[in-house]
Amino acid sequence: MYGAPHLVSDVMTGTVATVGRRAPFTEIVHLMRGWEISALPVIEDEGRVVGVVSEADLLPPAREFPDEPDAGRPVPRGPVDAARAGALVAGDLMSSPAVTVRADATLAEAARLMAREGVKRLPVVDDADLLAGVLSRADLLKVFLRDDEDIAEEVRREIAPFLFPPPSSAVRVEVRDGVVTLSGRVCDTALVPVAARLVRAVEGVVDVEFDLAHAGATP
């Protein structure tokens, strides 16, 4: 009845920078800077994700600098760390096992996983657990870039005619900057809260407003 939710595969980034377990510290830093990303999947074999190395993994604990005024905040590795950094590789630095998401997961599922695990990027894996892409927080926001008319058409097609079928009801659907407005006359105003929940669930909808009257009311 209603439009299928967007999946991770719809918005993920398919071209991914990765490293192997033996990738040195400096290579990881250069890749992050070059790709302007905050984390890299660590893979082995044919592309199986075994971990993730993030910017946080490249920073020493604040306790290593107890007398610094910013103690308690991550501090970039300095010259005193150079020797140790040169000896470190991705396998030593990475968080493992990696928190991953399937390509066929919904964006809502992926968002909940990010929030629960406190991560900004998720490696996306296929049915064989091989790397298929990466999903970032920015990717999750792509659904809110849907064209207003595209959103309006989905509401007109998938929601309005089922809750407020004509000719007993006459509902107009307009969308501006992601805000959906339903106006007109409806036979059953008790269904308005249901409509609100369903419309807000449409991907790309920022909010919903109503200007509805009962079909039997005097104009």
Image (cartoon, helix red, strand yellow):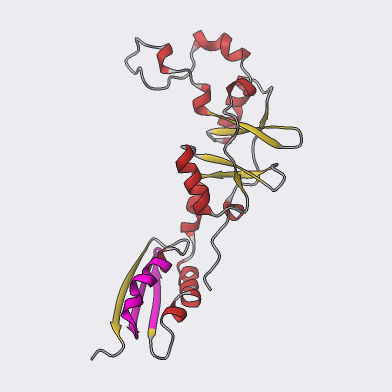
Q: Is residue 148 above or below residue 116?
A: below
Residue 181 among magenta residues: yes
In the rendered structure, which segment of residues is drawn in magenta? 171-198
- Relative to residue 192, is residue 134 drawn left or right? right
Number of marks drawn:
0
Residue 160 location, x and y as percent?
Answer: 44, 78
- Residue 219: in sight, yes or no? no
Q: Is residue 44 above or below residue 181?
A: above
Q: Is residue 103 above or below residue 167?
A: above
Q: In the image as oriented, which residue stretches furthest toward the right?
A: 46
Which residue sits at x=54%, y=35%? 36
Residue 161 location, x and y as percent?
Answer: 46, 81
Which residue sits at x=39%, y=66%? 197
Residue 165 location, x and y as percent?
Answer: 44, 85
Q: Is residue 156 above or below residue 207?
A: below
The quadrant where residue 128 appears:
top right
Which residue sits at x=53%, y=68%? 3
- Relative to residue 46, is residue 131 drawn left or right? left
